[in-house]
Image (cartoon, grey):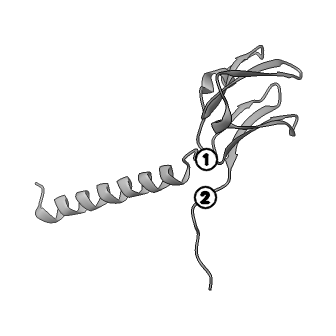
Amino acid sequence: MLRKGDIVLVAVMILVVAAGYYIINLTRSSGDGAVAVIKLNNEVVKKIDLNSVAGTELVRLEGKYSNVIAVEKGRIRFQDADCPDRLCVNTGWISLRGETAVCLPNKAMIVIEGEDTATDGIAY
């Protein structure tokens, strides 16, 4: 049987989880400074400002295997790959700072980086 205290405890727990989810998503938003960094063999191949893309751009990576990366305004993904497992293609679109898509067989990686425009603190 539920008591009044149990209901209050569950309500507080739901509020804490909702607040945590909101804070995490707020800090990982793509924002104005979102930059996709494309790497092959741990070397930067290209950096793309995701908010300045007009239309759809394709980037081809040639390593042990081939990858085709699709870039649209605010998002990026592995569109096609000839690697054995094609898990990179199944990752889908990424757009938030901190997200990563990887093609392990080709040693290719897409990382969303960016400048955090929020103020951490003020010193006088």
Residue, x 67% and y 36% (percent of image)? 52
Secondary element at image label 1: loop
Amino acid found under the numbered disc labelled 2: Thr
Looking at the picture, how far across and down is residue 104, in whole percent? 77, 29
Q: Which residue is mark 2?
A: 117
The quarter of the rendered structure image containing the N terminus is bottom left
Number of numbered callouts drawn:
2
Left or right: 58, with 23 as reference point: right
The quarter of the rendered structure image containing the C terminus is bottom right
Q: Which residue is mark 1?
A: 32
Residue, x 24% and y 62% (percent of image)? 9
Q: Is residue 119 above or below residue 123?
A: above
Nearest to the observer: residue 72 or residue 12: 72
Q: Which mark is residue 71?
A: none
Task: Tell me, yes or no, whether the two marked residues, 2 and 1, touch with CB atoms within 8 Å.
Answer: yes
Nearest to the observer: residue 52 or residue 94: 52
Looking at the picture, how far across and down is residue 118, in whole percent? 57, 61
